[in-house]
Image (tube, rainbow, N blue to C red):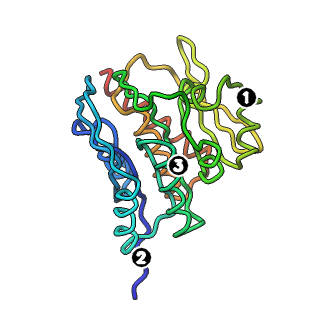
Amino acid sequence: MSAKTKIPLTIAGFDPSSGAGLTADLATFQHFGLKGVAVCTAVTYQNNNYFKDVDWISAEKIIAQIEVLSQEFDFEFIKIGLIENGDSLLKVIAFLLDKNPAIKIIWDPILRASSGFDFHEEKGVQNLEKILEKIWLITPNKKEAKNLFGEINEESLLKISKKFKTNILVKSFKEDESYISDLIINQKSIQTIDCQKINSSIHGSGCKLSAAILAHLFSGKGLVESCELAQFYLKNLLLNAKN
């Protein structure tokens, strides 16, 4: 029997405008020369400016999709984006780690659409501590980090990283008129990535950033370098959108 092909996997929602979600992730992988595969967690009804509704796909059906893909492919890095709730997320993560305990899972916790639609009515995410114990990297923006962890600062984020043995990237942790700073916490230390602030926005920027991080990790780069290169990629996307 021939060896399975190693390939990046995104587990995310379907955005018919392709600004975010699994189609945006696959396009990002392709930009970096990688073929990826995708599992659908939700069907959204939206365009680039308006979000109407979402139909969720159950954890069991998400797992069934992964099971079929696993017959052909091996996964080392997996990104998980939009998903119904913490219970579904935990079931999916448990299944992935049961098949391969060495899998590194990147969770981009999408709590709210850029157009203002709230995916989760309750504050925080159920089973959060169990989820953090099992993932390799979480990539919230500052508002999402506060929603998940409460009031945050560098000391509190380092304690969370050490306690749950997971890495944390907080997007736009600090910003002023000229610069934004992302914060990377890797259980032992804290590093800052500074970038010129661009007064422009694109639909699904967080999805694209986390997919770019996965692409660089898949290609053998380390955590900090992958985050730096992903931020540079997003900067260019924002500049193109502005122009």
Query: What amino acid type should be assigned to the residue bearing mark 1?
Result: Glu
Q: Secondary structure at mark 1?
A: helix
Q: Is residue 101 above or below residue 43?
A: below
Q: Secondary structure at mark 3?
A: strand
Task: Tell me which label, 2 or 3, sits earlier in the chain.
Answer: 2
Q: Which residue is mark 3?
A: 106
Q: Quote the CA–CA distance across marks 1 and 2.
A: 41 Å
Q: Position of residue 231 (x, y in %)?
A: 50, 35
Give the mark count.
Answer: 3
Which quadrant, please, contains the N terminus?
A: bottom left
Q: Nearer the viewer, residue 183 or 198?
A: 183
Label 2: how many Cα within 10 Å (few below 14, some 14–19, many 20+): few
Query: What amino acid type should be assigned to the residue bearing mark 3?
Result: Ile
Residue at position x 36%, y 74% in the image: 72
Q: Nearer the viewer, residue 46 or 209?
A: 46
Q: Position of residue 212 (x, y in %)?
A: 45, 45
Q: Which residue is mark 2?
A: 4
Label 1: how many Cα within 10 Å (few below 14, some 14–19, many 20+): some
Q: Which residue is mark 1?
A: 154
Query: What amino acid type should be assigned to the residue bearing mark 2?
Result: Lys
Q: Quote the CA–CA distance across marks 3 and 1.
A: 21 Å
Q: Residue furthest top?
A: 177
Q: Quote the CA–CA distance across marks 2 and 3.
A: 22 Å
Task: Tell me which label, 3 or 1, sits earlier in the chain.
Answer: 3
Task: Tell me which label, 1 or 2, sits earlier in the chain.
Answer: 2
Q: Is residue 146 above or below residue 158?
A: above
Which quadrant, please, contains the C terminus?
A: top left
